[in-house]
Image (cartoon, rainbow, N blue to C red):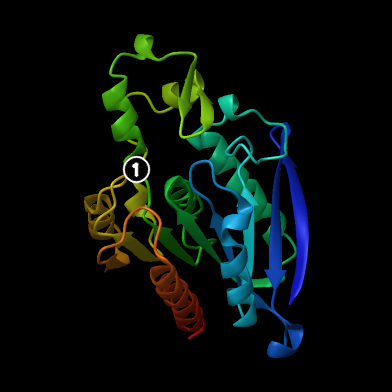
Amino acid sequence: MTKFEFSVPHHGRETHGFAVLPDADQKADAKFPLVIFSHGYNGHETDFAGTADYFAANGVAAASITFSGGSTRDASGFPTTSMTIYTECEDLSAVIDHLTADGRFDGLFLFGASMGGLVSAMTARALGEERVRGLCLLFPALCISDNWNAAFPDAADIPETVELWGMTLGRGFFLSMHGKNLADGVGEYGGDVLIMHGDRDPIVNVSYGERAAEEYENAQLEVFAGEGHGFSHDANLRMEGMTLSFVHRISRKKKG
């Protein structure tokens, strides 16, 4: 495997990540499908380090990013109080452009967990199936705008900062989604979708995964019995195997 780090300047900030490529001798033309991992709230690119290695060992290139201002461990200098769902969509789109610019990969897949699932879903809808071959959503937080619009029905009540789960958010995070449903229209993405969700998720009810599966034209929903928001070790192994199988299957289907 070959590993490298990258930093993508865009919109006056930089988004950092790493990539892991399979050994070239696994394939004659040395072109592999690429999966880009997007972490959840206050996550980090290293959340998917083990999964990226597993994918690369099995013929799939993997990249993982840290959203600018999307984590207290982000080293970009972009403040968490300036981060919004839309800035994270910009980050992901910039990384996609950067990694796919030279045509070295054979098809792009997006994988998003929790809030990164919402970002990945919104980005896939914007780019379409012509650029995004497949979409994998792990307990996707399609509930975010519902939750915060209920918490702050009047925009005047939104404070300048909110401390949430160890990270400080700015007023713009909430204003950017006020009166909107960010999940509206994500089902317009016409590519293949794999949704994995625990039936005991206390943060994002499984009903959001079920609803998404109905809205996508080509969706497969896998409900993990007894799992919450963050899977057990065994469930993570199952998730990795299912995702790898999905990527290989869709890659073969598109070629055929």
- Residue 252: tell me if it is visible: yes
Above or below, 147 relative to 187: above
Of all residues, the one furthest to the top in this rendering is: 156
Identity of the residue drawn at 26% across and 50% down: 208
Q: Secondary structure at mark 1?
A: loop
In the rendered picture of this protein, how many numbered marks are placed on residues? 1
Identity of the residue drawn at 49% across and 49% down: 123
- Residue 89, quarter of picture: top right
- Say left or right for 206 vs 70: left
**Residue at the spot of label 1:** 183
Identity of the residue drawn at 57% across and 35% down: 87
Circle 1: residue type: Ala
- Residue 27: tell me if it is visible: no
Above or below, 47 relative to 35: above
Above or below, 196 relative to 13: below
- Say left or right for 248 vs 214: right
In depth, the one of 130 and 168 nearer the eye is: 168
- Say left or right for 186 vs 42: left
Check the picture and name the quadrant holding the N terminus. bottom right
Residue 52, horizontal then vertical, whole percent: 61, 68
Residue 239, horizontal then vertical, whole percent: 42, 70
- Residue 59, quarter of picture: bottom right
Residue 73, horizontal then vertical, whole percent: 65, 41
